[in-house]
Image: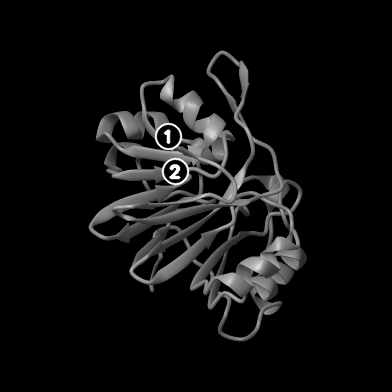
Amino acid sequence: MEITFHGHSVLEIQANGKTIFIDPFITGNGQCDLKAEDVKPDVILLTHGHSDHVGDTIQLAKDNDALVVAPFELANYLETKGLNVHPMHIGGSHQFDFGTVKLTQAFHGSSYTEEDGTIVYTGMPAGILFTADNKTVYAAGDTALFGDMKMYGERHTIDAAFLPIGDNFTMGPEDAAAAAQWLKAKKVIPVHYNTFPVIEQNPEEFISLLPEGVGQILHAGDKISL
């Protein structure tokens, strides 16, 4: 499995011959190294409905006939836009031909703002445990620290965890470091920081809170192989 970070919370996963994007916020993302017209996903996984996570999903899914996997209410909303969706919910898992997706809880909000300013409630936010090639990746989504992360670490061997550190809207560095300890992930990569002034953080300070060799800073376009 190969994972490329594309800024903010955008992840590209290559697994089982498929290109899988998590939260493809590309257009308007000053951290991103991609242009939306160059992105060709087979699958899009979404954690919640906020615009800095749904991002370019609607156009990408239409242009590439991509499957969109999302929490139930968000998936139903996107289906009204003509997308091919697979709805899921917290605690549920499903085995696809590209890997297994399990949605975890996340403590945050979830709504989508349409072009005319209408706000659509899109259900509960989620994190994602994605397993393929005998490797498991945890994309926490936007979340506060919560105790069940201990259980995730006990019940799953997490090879890489992508944790928000921006504070204000999500965990800050100290809480994210506690999450990393509970999750027992082999690799921990900070995400969701420095995109906007209110979430500016020094990722080096976060890495210093982790055991040596666990934390890794990825810049847009950087890859890791599991």
Q: For the residue labelled by badge 1, is the local secondary structure a helix, a strand or a loop?
A: loop
The residue drawn where x is 75% and y is 63% is 147
Q: Is residue 67 above or below residue 144?
A: above
Q: Position of residue 102 (x, y in %)?
A: 50, 54
From the viewer's side, name the closer residue of 226 and 150.
150
Q: Quadrant of the C terminus?
A: bottom left
Residue 206, by quadrant, is bottom right
Q: Is residue 10 left or right of residue 152?
A: left
The residue drawn where x is 44% and y is 43% is 24
Q: For the residue labelled by badge 2, is the local secondary structure a helix, a strand or a loop?
A: loop
Report the disc number at residue 98.
none
Check disc 2: other Cα within 10 Å, few if <14, some if 14-19, many if 20+: many
Q: Position of residue 192 (x, y in %)?
A: 60, 53
* Residue at far top of view: 116
Instruction: Give the residue pinned by disc 2.
Output: 24
Q: Is residue 24 above or below residue 16?
A: above
In the image, what residue type sits under mark 2? Pro
C-beta proximity under 8 Å, tags 2 and 1: yes
From the viewer's side, name the closer residue of 221 and 76.
76
Alpha carbon of mark 2 to alpha carbon of mark 1: how far? 6 Å
* Residue at far left of view: 17
In the image, what residue type sits under mark 1? Asp
Asked if residue 166 shows in the view, the reply is yes
Residue 166, by quadrant, is bottom right
Asked if residue 205 shows in the view, the reply is no
Instruction: Give the residue pinned by disc 1.
Output: 56
From the viewer's side, name the closer residue of 162 and 184.
184
